[in-house]
Image: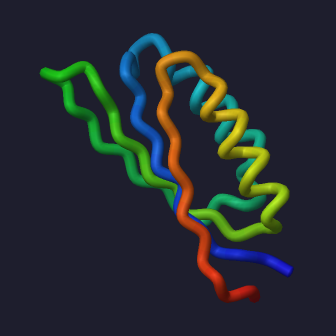
Amino acid sequence: MKKIGVISAVLDDPIRMSQKFNDMISEYQHIIRGRMGIPFAEEHISVVSITVCGSLDEINELTGKLGNLNGVTVKTAISKKTI
């Protein structure tokens, strides 16, 4: 059973964190359906939204790994509907 979710991430220092963040995202490309990043250059912050479709375990695993990156804040919303 798969769920659809949105992972929202705020990178406090995107210049320093973007490579680690992107490497982590690429490991889960099989569940990622879309990604949108918005840079806030003057504030030195980036906001990233990632749409995912996968098992709860896969989504939670990705969320946990991203949240463990220093300077990254993550929240996830998951649909109640299964597909």
Between 83 and 22, the one lying in front of the other is: 83
Residue 72 spot, x, y in % from top left:
50, 27
Quarter where residue 5 is shown: bottom right
The image's colouring method is: rainbow
Residue 73 spot, x, y in % from top left:
48, 33
As drawn, 45 above or below 82 = above
Residue 80 spot, x, y in % from top left:
64, 83
Q: In which quarter of the image is the N terminus?
A: bottom right
Locate residue 24 relative to residue 13 in the image: left or right.
Answer: right
Residue 6 spot, x, y in % from top left:
53, 62
Q: In which quarter of the image is the C terminus?
A: bottom right
Q: Which residue is drawn at 82% across and 67% down?
A: 55
As drawn, 76 above or below 44 = below
Quarter where residue 65 is shown: top right
Locate residue 74 relative to residue 30 in the image: left or right.
Answer: left
Quarter where residue 56 is shown: bottom right
Extreme top residue here? 16
Q: Which residue is drawn at 65% across and 40% down?
A: 25
Q: Which residue is drawn at 25% across and 19% down?
A: 44
